[in-house]
Image (cartoon, rainbow, N blue to C red):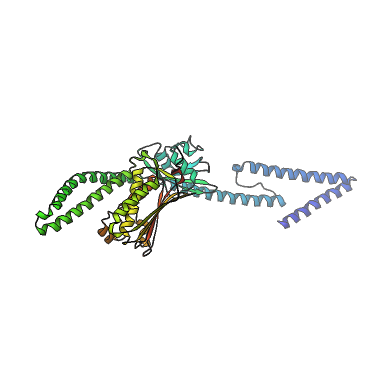
Amino acid sequence: MQNIWSRHLRFTLAGLAGSTLAGLYFGHPVYGLTTGLGLYLLWTLYQTRSLAHWLADPNTGHEAPQSMGIWGSFFEKLHKLTQSSRQTQERLRSRIDRIQESTNAMRDGVIMTDALGAMEWWNGAAEHLLGFRRSTDQGQYIYNFIRTPAFKAYFDAKNYRDPLELSSPAKPHIHLQIQISLFGEDDRLIVAKDVSRLHQLEQMRQDFVSNVSHEMRTPLTVISGYLETLVDNADDLPAKWRRAINTMATQSFRMETLISDLILLSRIETGEESENDVPTDVGQLVRQICQDARTLSGENQHDISFEASSEYLINGNENQLRSAFSNLIFNAVKYTPARGKIKVLWFTDSEGGHLSVNDTGAGIDEVHIPRLTERFYRADPSRHKDTGGTGLGLAIVKHVLINHDGSLEIKSRLGEGSEFVCHFPTERLVSKTTD
């Protein structure tokens, strides 16, 4: 480019010198220089006009204007840049089209919004699942269409570790699982998955467990009643039957406990009585449970202590909270050796309320901790045979805490005891002074 500019400069100066000499020949050198400058200016204006026309309407043709010298080189290089830019745009457009085609082929709804929630693009599945219309909804805020308060709170919270489940605003029979990812400058990529079948299967499972548990309770009560009568009159029976009857009575009691736990878990899962939330005095409630735990301990003489360093109440369902707390404290009694220590602590801080149950039992291997709250999961099945556990206690605790916006933290190591901590958010705390 430097060489072309040098040649152009020499050619221009030579032209102006020639026009000046021609003017000098006729006795008017200034007129000759002026004429040369005017011709150069007209040529430059003509080239500029050609460039302007070419840039203003690139669809008139792909060929650049023909010229010579520096303008010819300029047109040629600009033409190459234009061609390169057009090819790059075509490749990007092709990739975007391919991405959009592949996204449209997905059965999950995909929506892109800006940081404020204005919808920029969505695929065909989103139109089917959420009822969007491309002709009118472009640029609208997504929470104007998904009006569930839970979705607005989920969208604004920016905590997308867990998905959100809700019903489709356009088709209420469709149950959706919403997952949001952040990209760019707080833009959102929203994926809506149809989980109606899974939701129906889960509902069928809950209904089955609930119905079967209720149906089994009546005949089992009859059997238990007759067994209790036989146990009370065991002295009148042959000796070989006494052990069998006592064993049947024990197993019948375990079955009744299991069915009661299944019914309770079913009620908690379905959110029954969730509207009965009232301020609950945790200190008073846990003191009663600890007293019952001392009775359960009996001859084992566990050292059970309770300390409440907070006067806050929990806004929740007292029956559910009693079930959760008693499961944790009674488990500590069952799985802690005789004369072991069990410390229960209720306290609050800036993060909310916390109930800690700490024991000096045998502890639990860390590999089992992630699965302890699953139904019927047993870290050590032999212990349940000795204690009569149903394997549902921690599942009940987990779902009670979910109903109260809380979480369960488990800390344990083999040979070092265990600690179970129930965490409640600050929104659930109520001061005793509040009327």
Q: Position of residue 20 (x, y in %)?
A: 85, 48
Q: Is residue 6 visible?
A: yes
| 74 with respect to 372 (left or right) | right
Q: Position of residue 187 (x, y in %)?
A: 52, 46
Assign the N terminus to one quadrant of the image.
bottom right
- Compared to residue 368, the image places residue 147 above or below, namely above
| Residue found 11% across the figure and 55% down from its top | 235
Q: Nearer the viewer, residue 11 or 315?
A: 315
Q: Number of labelled discs?
A: 0
Displayed quadrant of residue 362: bottom left
Q: Position of residue 390 (x, y in %)?
A: 27, 53
Q: Nearer the viewer, residue 215 or 126?
A: 215
| 169 with respect to 386 (left or right) | right
- Compared to residue 318, the image places residue 377 above or below, namely below
Q: Residue furthest bottom?
A: 415
| 320 with respect to 221 (left or right) | right
Assign the C terminus to one quadrant of the image.
top left
Q: Residue furthest right?
A: 27
Q: Position of residue 211 (x, y in %)?
A: 24, 43
| Residue found 53% across the figure and 47% down from its top | 186
Q: Nearer the viewer, residue 53 or 431?
A: 431
Q: Is residue 68 visible?
A: no
- Compared to residue 297, the image places residue 96 above or below, namely above
| Residue found 85% across the figure and 45% down from its top | 32
